Image (tube, rainbow, N blue to C red):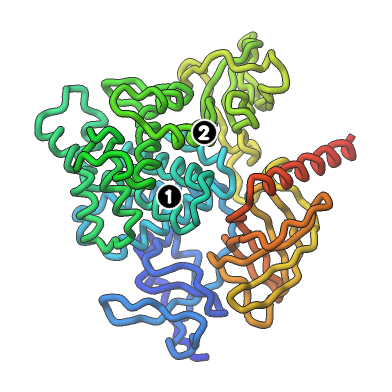
Amino acid sequence: MKHRKVNLDYIKSGRPLDRPIVDEDGTLVLNDGFVLEESRALDKINLIEEESIGSKYIPPKTIEEEKPPIVIKAPEDNETPFEVIDKIIRQIESLFREGDIKAQKYFVKRVFNVCGLIQRVCYDNKDLALGSIMLEQRARYTVRHPLRTAIVCHIVSGHLGWAPDEQVSLVAAAVTMNIGMLDMQERMHKQQAPLSAWQKDAIRKHPSDGAALLKELGVTDELWLGAVLQHHEALDGNGYPHGLKDAGIGIGARVLSLADAYCARVSGRNYRPPLSPSVAVRSLFLSNTHPVDKDLAVSFVKNLGVFPPGTFVKLKNGETAIVTQRGEKINHPIVHTLVRANGTRLMSPIKRDTAANENFAVTQVITQEKAGVEINKFQLWGYGMFKRTKTRMRKTDRLRIELPAKLLDMENLSTADCDILNISETGCLLKTLVRKDGALVVNKTYHLTFRILDKTLENLSSMVRNSQLRYGIQMVGMQFLDITPEQQKHVALYLKKEAEKEAEEEV
């Protein structure tokens, strides 16, 4: 296999790659257009000649001359979800701050890179994702608002059973929904005076302007474009820009519209204080301007809960707490007490299940200012007292086990034996020997079969989200794609029983 060395200066951090990155086996790791955060960690890299790749990977053709991919080893994935969210913020800022958006190269691929990171955070921990974006106030509004909306869209569309590619399209629409009025949106967020006539006109035109701009930038995805174009249409026909109604409005636009409205309400404006998340959720049903899709509104409430993660609350016993996890019932979340009833601030927050004891019931939603406390999000969501790169989630999130499983590759009609090393309701970590036909491929779907609690979960469609190769052994993070509510409850029951067993052993 021919190689030719390239100095690290060839790759600039903060700029999109102009060719794909694959691992030593030719498996795609990062697509062209990906923005490297720190190139100095790569040291030296090799460029593989195109003819040496064979049939494993063929880089896509671009307007420029087709170029060979860069080869590096996939880095060990040690980032916490909070660090990934920081990376998402930087990448969205980069997308939207560059003078002439029309002149940007690889815009579509860069948006999809952002979408992949958002999916990764939600896959790791949906409660953390929701809570973290509620607490994130550092980024400017035109960055944090689409991020919040995109996370809500991903979680709700997953609950609705959307296919992964459809979820990505909707998340991309959420990230770019206001691309037709970015500069004005930032000014309006700070503006206290009434909107001018030209501002109102620009607002009504921004969906069509945004869709047209996305087409110029190379977007051809119909769900993405349709959601951006229609996300301000209304079921009664009084929306804009085209006055569509009822079935004329796509499902993607309906989900995006509700997510946009919810996130705007909890953000507030200079002329309007933010609503509490619980009020914002309830307001989805009680809109004074336009009727809403009631079925979708129900899905939002079921997914976000009456008290979404990141909400500061008062408990019946007088304690001040923050919601960190949605409970089994939408009005009974898991919280962590920050301040005792006597005003004592706790160094280590105490976990409370508001459904377990009536004294822990939520009686009031308050602002963080009224709570009067600084919070350590790493500590609240199971990452220790301080920011750390190597960490382990709580036992209740991922259960460490050693469970035999069988993996089926429908494309090659081959099977492989593997072991599940940890499992949650949304995915698992697999350990397997590298197969004769090659390693498992990131973003490829396989079918997993395993047995728990005397029940076999057969051919569960699962996507490889991350991978690490060492000494012929592959460690693979899998996301369950089509797990049914019944199967998910079965896994949850298994997790609960095993956690109880571990607790008894510790005693």
The amino acid sitting under disc 2 is: Leu
Q: Is residue 304 above or below residue 248?
A: above
Question: What secondary structure is found at the residue carrying circle 2?
Answer: helix
Contact flag, marks 2 and 1 (Cβ < 8 Å): no
Q: Mark 1 belongs to which amino acid?
A: Ile
Name which residue lies at 36% across and 56% down: 111
The local secondary structure at tag 1 comes to: helix
Residue 301 percent location from the top left of the image: 50, 31
Q: Which residue reaches farthest front?
A: 247
The 10 Å Cα crowd at callout 2, few under 14, some 14 to 19, many 20 or more, is many
Quick check: 285 left or right of 188? right
Q: Which residue bears the numbered disc 2?
A: 304
In the picture, measured across the screen, residue 412 lies left or right of residue 311, that is right
Q: Is residue 200 above or below residue 106?
A: above
The disc placed on residue 88 is 1
- Which image quarter holds the C terminus? top right
Going 74% across and 59% down the picture, which residue do you hit? 420
Image point (86%, 40%), residue name: 501
Label 2 to label 1, Cα distance in Å?
21 Å
Q: Position of residue 238 (x, y in %)?
A: 22, 33
In the picture as drawn, the residue positioned furthest to the top comes out as 342
**Earlier along the polypeptide chain: callout 2 or callout 1?**
1
Who is closer to the viewer here, 433 or 468?
433
Which class describes the residues within 10 Å of circle 1: few (<14), some (14-19), or many (20+)?
many
Asked whether the viewer can see residue 374, the reply is no
Determine which of the numbered discs, if any, sits on residue 21 in the image. none
Between 59 and 471, which is closer to the camera in this rendering? 59
